[in-house]
Image (cartoon, grey):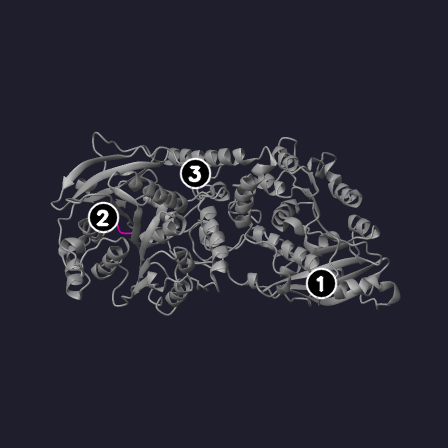
């Protein structure tokens, strides 16, 4: 049923007589229900949440323009999820290169630099000998091999791999990680083979924390000086994966700074977890020219380690689409007898179609090796060598055949010695690192608060762009929404009309109730409540006094049961803890890297209702939002996303801040929610439209007030400082008085 039918119903209500469908014997619960007793809404969000082992298809865009729009938002999603929107301030690398070993036709040096102050990225630097001029560089993140850069395969296993054709020589089979670095150096490339956090020389944050985190640490879950994986870190979008991605970005800075490197020819290749790092870096770092992520790009398992997951990252997307962000640049991938084995039929044809649409169909390649288990063996490396030769313009004759080399062991490769001591690490270092990261972000965002109108664009890009990803949705298309009426009652001076609002695109459904005055003046107020639609009604199903005041003034009021309210609850009891995926490890990213948080989903529900009442025929002159009695934070987030679709909003925040939520499964938990000036950042996005705010202090609203001032709308921000118990009535009074 379209909105025009509803409006027609009440605009001619004085000429019609409706049967009263509710008898005096009907219970309150029956009065308030939209669906039959015992029936839950037909909503996809009631199904088990998605996890990393789900199905993640990629649907190519129909044309270049559509892809450019999608790609821009997806890159922003990656950066926001990694805590890199905006990027941390690039401090001095303070790079050190020492301990050169002459290996005949190439050299190996020990190298490290600071990606963040005091946080070292360590690795081996391979250089060819006898080459002149600027050389291409290849970054080699290693993935989850035991001891990483120091990895040594079992000798007996290597002999088996040689007989199977997976390897050619014992040393390269013992260390396929070193093998690719050596061969690429022999081909004329400068190669930086760097440690993942917690591997080899990178021990400031331990392997157990970075890759095996399993249980929340109460001592790290604190309002200040928090640690990784804490609710506070998650609300500020800080993660191990973000640290690793940023270290890879700084690795590009490092190799670009070397005098013998051609900064226009930088490539990246890694396998498994190193493959994740490779396509993630390629997606967000424009200086990468060629990429070859091995055995990781897949529509199936997306990466099982905590270092491969961050909250917000894969909501609505997956590894294949993120790899597609590298287009039109040259992308090579490989498969094995693992989660990538179906790539030839699921994922790669879409990548081919994607590259073809962009006019570069020959810039994507796959080598399919289902007869080998998870690997980066000689067969895959050989394909990579040819890919690099072609696209880095090395000019080598083919075929390129890997030659044996002398494998080095950990004592020869470690970057630390008496002159280069190990840096401090541990819990205090971890806290200090995250504090620097947070303080730097806060400082950057504070400088974005504009002093004049010309500065608004950057503020809206960073704050608005960040909030957009954190909330995860804007207004749904009105064409996706359908209303089905289930009940209509004429009472006194209004109609109460109930039904379901279905978002067909998202497969979501809301029980919804409209109160329409018989003499409608053109305004609709959307009013969510912490108790759902029942929170705005008396025991007999009539609207409460505050709602009735709006009706008496000729305003229509709409309320609804949002997810896990009212008719979404089998037992009627509000939930205290949100759902989590089956993964037993207590890292938020395993759930919220693939699913919106409950807080965000409830904001989506509000946005669906706003879109419905705003966009249909008989469009109201004004659409208002009101959030009081605990619903203020949802409404603030919805108002930030709705922008021009909402005329004015009244919000009682009760001083809520996402940074103070201390449980990753609290219904109030929102990954990234605190990062963009917390709730005040969302409130500021209401400017220049009228905004009434309760629950704040003059100091806490300073940023919001400045945004309104710069917009030339200082008078449109009203701060209520009266009795909090009367905030709802005061909000209604303001909505009735403001023009």
The residue under label 2 is 189
- At label 2, counting other C-alpha atoms closer than 10 Å, the crowd grade (few under 14, some 14-19, many 20 or more) is many
CB atoms of marks 3 and 1 within 8 Å:
no
The residue under label 3 is 88
Q: Nearer the viewer, residue 290 or 422?
A: 290
- Could you tell me which residue is drawn at 50 percent across and 55 percent down? 69
Q: In the displayed image of the protein, which residue is found farthest to the left?
A: 104
Who comes first in sequence, dot 3 or dot 2?
3
Q: For the residues marked 2 and 1, what is the alpha-carbon distance in whole angstroms? A: 69 Å
Residue at disc 3, secondary structure: loop
**Which of the 4 image quarters holds residue 449?**
top right
The residue under label 1 is 33
User: Left or right: where does residue 116 sit relative to residue 733?
Assistant: left
Front of the two marks 2 and 1 = 2
Who comes first in sequence, dot 3 or dot 1?
1
- Residue 231 appears at what percent x and percent y? 49, 43
Q: Nearer the viewer, residue 644 or 381?
A: 644
- Residue 206 appears at what percent x and percent y? 33, 41
Residue at disc 1, secondary structure: loop
User: Left or right: where does residue 505 sit relative to residue 488?
Assistant: left
Asked if residue 146 is among those painted magenta in the image, a careful observer would answer yes
* Residue 661 appears anywhere in the view: no
Front of the two marks 3 and 2 = 2
Q: Quadrant of the C terminus?
A: top right
What's drawn in magenta, residue-wise? 143-152
* Residue 372 appears anywhere in the view: yes
- Residue 575 appears at what percent x and percent y? 59, 53
- Could you tell me which residue is drawn at 37 percent across and 70 percent down? 345
556 to 18, vertically: above or below: above
- Could you tell me which residue is drawn at 30 percent across and 48 percent down? 266
């Amino acid at each position: 049923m379209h909105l025009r039918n509803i409006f027609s119903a009440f605009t001619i209500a004085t000429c019609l007589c409706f049967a009263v469908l509710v008898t005096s014997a009907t219970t309150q619960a029956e009065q308030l229900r939209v669906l039959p007793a015992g029936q839950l809404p037909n909503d996809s969000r009631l199904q088990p949440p998605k996890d990393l082992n789900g199905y993640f298809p990629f649907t190519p865009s129909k044309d270049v323009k559509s892809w450019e729009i999608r790609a821009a938002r997806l890159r922003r999603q990656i950066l926001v999820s990694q805590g890199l929107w905006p990027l941390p301030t690039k401090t001095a690398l303070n790079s050190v290169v020492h301990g050169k070993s002459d290996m005949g036709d190439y050299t190996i040096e020990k190298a490290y630099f600071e990606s963040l102050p005091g946080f070292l990225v360590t690795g081996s630097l391979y250089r060819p000998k006898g080459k002149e001029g600027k050389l291409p560089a290849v970054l080699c993140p290693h993935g989850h091999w035991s001891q990483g850069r120091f990895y040594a395969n079992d000798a007996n296993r290597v002999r088996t791999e040689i007989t199977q054709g997976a390897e050619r020589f014992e040393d390269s089979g013992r260390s396929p990680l070193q093998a690719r670095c050596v061969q690429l150096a022999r081909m004329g490339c400068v190669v930086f083979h760097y440690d993942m956090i917690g591997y080899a020389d990178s021990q400031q944050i331990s392997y157990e924390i970075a890759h095996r985190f399993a249980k929340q640490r109460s001592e790290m879950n604190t309002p200040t000086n928090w640690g990784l994986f804490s609710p506070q870190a998650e609300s500020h979008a800080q993660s191990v994966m973000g640290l690793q991605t940023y270290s890879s970005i700084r690795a590009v800075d490092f190799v670009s700074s070397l005098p013998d490197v051609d900064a226009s020819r930088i490539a990246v290749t890694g396998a498994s977890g190193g493959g994740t790092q490779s396509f993630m870096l390629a997606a967000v770092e424009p200086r990468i020219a060629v990429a070859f992520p091995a055995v990781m790009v897949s529509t199936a398992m997306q990466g099982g380690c905590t270092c491969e997951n961050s909250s917000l990252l894969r909501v609505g997307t997956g590894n294949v689409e993120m790899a597609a962000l590298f287009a039109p640049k040259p992308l090579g991938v490989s498969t094995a007898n693992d989660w990538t084995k179906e790539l030839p039929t699921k994922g790669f044809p879409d990548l081919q179609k994607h590259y073809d649409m962009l006019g570069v169909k020959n810039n994507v390649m796959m080598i399919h090796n289902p007869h080998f288990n998870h690997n980066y063996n000689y067969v895959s490396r050989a394909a990579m060598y040819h890919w690099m030769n072609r696209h880095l313009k090395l000019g080598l004759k083919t075929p390129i055949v890997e030659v044996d080399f002398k494998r080095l062991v950990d004592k020869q490769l470690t970057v630390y010695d008496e002159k280069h001591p190990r840096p401090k690490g541990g819990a205090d270092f971890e806290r200090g690192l995250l504090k620097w990261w947070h303080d730097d972000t806060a400082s950057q965002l504070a400088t974005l608060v504009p002093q004049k109108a010309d500065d608004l664009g950057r503020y809206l890009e960073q704050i608005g762009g960040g909030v957009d990803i954190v909330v995860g949705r804007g207004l749904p298309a009105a064409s996706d929404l359908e209303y089905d009426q289930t009940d209509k009652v004429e009472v006194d001076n209004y109609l109460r009309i109930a039904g379901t609002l279905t978002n067909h695109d998202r497969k979501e459904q809301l029980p919804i109730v409209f109160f329409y005055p018989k003499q409608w003046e053109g305004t609709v107020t959307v009013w969510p409540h912490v108790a759902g639609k029942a929170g705005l009604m008396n025991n007999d199903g009539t609207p409460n006094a505050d709602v009735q005041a709006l009706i008496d003034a000729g305003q229509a009021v709409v309320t609804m049961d949002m997810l896990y309210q009212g008719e979404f609850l089998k037992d009627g009891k509000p939930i205290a803890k949100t759902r989590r995926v089956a993964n037993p490890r207590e890292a938020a990213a395993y759930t919220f890297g693939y699913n919106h948080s409950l807080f965000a989903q409830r904001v989506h529900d509000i946005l669906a209702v706003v879109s419905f009442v705003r966009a249909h025929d008989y469009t109201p002159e004004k659409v208002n939002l009101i959030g009081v009695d605990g619903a203020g934070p949802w409404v603030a987030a919805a108002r930030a996303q709705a922008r021009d679709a909402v005329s004015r909003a009244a919000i009682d925040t009760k001083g809520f801040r996402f940074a103070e939520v201390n449980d990753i499964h609290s219904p109030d938990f929102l990954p990234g929610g605190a990062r963009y000036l917390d709730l005040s950042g969302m409130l500021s996005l209401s400017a220049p439209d009228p905004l009434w705010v309760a629950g704040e202090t003059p100091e806490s609203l300073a940023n919001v007030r400045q945004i309104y001032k710069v917009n030339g709308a200082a008078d449109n921000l009203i701060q209520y400082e009266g009795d909090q118990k009367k905030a709802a009535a005061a909000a209604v009074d303001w909505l009735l008085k403001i023009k």
